[in-house]
Image (cartoon, rainbow, N blue to C red):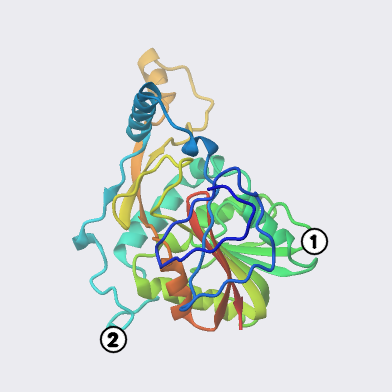
Amino acid sequence: AVSSAPFSMSLTAGDVCLLHPAAPDKLKMGVEVSTTPRILLSFYHLPEDLFKPRSKKSQASASESVGRETARKPTTVPVPSSAMPSVDKSSGSDFDATATPDIERTAVHEFYDAVASHWSETRHTAWPRVESFVGSLERGSLVCDVGCGNGKNMRRTQGQVLIGCDRSSKLVEICARQGLEVSVSDNMLLPYRSDTFDAVLSIAVLHHLSTEARRVQALRELARILRPGGRMLVYVWAQEQGSESRRNFTAPDVFVPWTHRPPPAAKQVQQPQSEATASEATTTPKEQVLQRYCHVYTQNELLDLVARAGGLEVLDCYYDTSNWCCVARKM
């Protein structure tokens, strides 16, 4: 029902409340909410046509459209249990969280070094809410972008000072050619002094870590280099992908295919040669489908990891462009 009068609802964990488009588009501040135990209410903006009755013809058309969309999504392959690290518990006494598992070495580190140039061509600008987070910091704030990739989050600032690092030497080279302040570093053991940075970014990094222990260790390192009161922003891929995504995840640990297009070989001045030899010399390298390891997160999984890292206060959590996101402050 649509009404401007006050109303009350009885909700339990997991319930969903839909607000009709005719309802006010802004909730007034100062609304008193009394819940025991405390629960988190998440409001989502849904398209208006969700509330419109559909004819049988439109329903059939929508079904066909969904079918075509599903067919376009790349196939993600669940990672076999035999490929995962043998110990995946932080309590495992024989497990060193700082040691790189084979699956990350081959399907993350070697992957990004192999595709760095092509991958960088598809990443141009920072996501709006990441850029907004950096822009909200005071001028002169020292910010570390851990897992900076090709540096897209470091290019546009409003007086903040950004330093970046990445595990891929090839991506760091791309950043260096842009004049960015970067280094090759591992998130497990960052080469920075404790209590140094005003803010830290971790965008699309933690979903490449294959064990809970390594994810917690990564967050602890991010917290370590933050000054007390400093803030971190973390983005991870969500298992619940939005309509803008081309992917469909069927398991938490997956291989995501990447169609790699190697750059053409550099042209060289050569002596006259036969037609066959000349043809071979100008052949464009063939495309390759490479697999990238990812652990995709369900709702609240990231918050649980932040709590386990310790010493952090969650300021905000939200869903953005098929990612679960968290803003936390070092206590």
**Kind of residue at disc 1:** Gly
Horizontal side, residue 44 vs residue 210: left or right: right
> Can residue 289 be seen in the rendering of this structure?
yes
| Residue at 28% in and 82% down | 92
Q: Which mark is residue 93?
A: 2
Residue found at x 73% / y 59%: 135
Query: Which residue of the protein is positioned furthest toward the top in this rendering?
Result: 275
Q: Residues within 10 Å of mark 1 (few under 14, many from 20)?
A: some
Residue most toward the left?
Answer: 82
Q: Looking at the image, is mark 2 or mark 1 earlier in the sequence?
A: 2
Which of the pair 222/73 is nearer the observer? 73
Say which residue label 1 marks: 159
Q: Nearer the viewer, residue 12 or 240?
A: 12
- In the rendering, at what x and y percent does residue 244 appear? 49, 40
Location of residue 308 (image quadrant): bottom left
As measured in the structure, the alpha-carbon distance from the residue carrying label 2 to the one carrying label 1 is 45 Å
Above or below for 227 versus 114? below
- Judged from the image, the secondary structure of the residue bearing numbered disc 1 is loop
User: What is the x, y in percent for residue 148?
Assistant: 57, 58
Q: Nearer the viewer, residue 43 or 74?
A: 43
